[in-house]
């Protein structure tokens, strides 16, 4: 998600440096994405967004499949 928008995050990456393209970095990015989706699922549940909660299972399933 940190690379999804071209706003102040661009300045972060300019200062921090480009991301590594190793397989370890790709795996770590998937873990962070899964964690983020977990937080989104909780927020959707809190707001009563049943369809959003249901969709989060599909999204997380795709990420978990990529991890194995």
Image (cartoon, grey):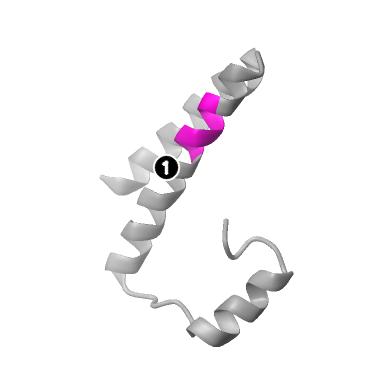
- The percent position of residue 17, horizontal first and vertical second, equals 49, 85
- From which residue to which does the magenta span run? 37-42
Furthest-right residue in this view: 7
Would you place residue 59 above or below residue 36 in this image?
above
- The percent position of residue 4, horizontal first and vertical second, equals 64, 60
Q: In the visual, does 52 lie left or right of 27?
A: right
Would you place residue 58 above or below residue 22 in this image?
above
Q: Nearer the viewer, residue 44 or 52?
A: 44
Q: Nearer the viewer, residue 24 or 9?
A: 9
Would you place residue 65 above or below residue 16 in this image?
above
Would you place residue 55 above or below residue 27 in this image?
above
Q: For the point 30% across and 47% down, which residue is it?
A: 67
Quadrant occupied by the C terminus: top left
Q: Which quadrant holds residue 61? A: top left
- The percent position of residue 31, horizontal first and vertical second, equals 36, 49
Residue 68 lies within the magenta run? no
Q: For the point 65% across and 13% down, which residue is it?
A: 48
Q: For the point 49% across and 82% down, which residue is it?
A: 16
Kindly identify which residue carries mark 1. 34
Q: For the point 52% across and 25% down, which residue is it?
A: 42
| SS label for mark 1 | helix
Q: Which quadrant holds residue 7? A: bottom right
Q: Which quadrant holds residue 51? A: top right
- Local packing at callout 1 (Cα closer than 10 Å; few below 14, some 14-19, many 20+) is many
- The percent position of residue 44, horizontal first and vertical second, equals 61, 24
Q: Mostly what secondary structure, the magenta segment? A: helix
Q: Nearer the viewer, residue 68 or 54?
A: 54
Quadrant occupied by the N terminus: bottom right
């Amino acid at each position: 998600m940190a690379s999804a928008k071209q706003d102040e995050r661009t300045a972060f990456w300019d200062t921090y440096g480009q991301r590594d393209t190793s397989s370890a970095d790709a795996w770590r990015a998937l873990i962070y994405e899964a964690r983020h989706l977990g937080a989104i699922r909780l927020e959707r549940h809190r707001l009563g967004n049943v369809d959003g909660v249901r969709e989060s299972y599909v999204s997380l399933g795709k990420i978990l499949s990529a991890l194995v």
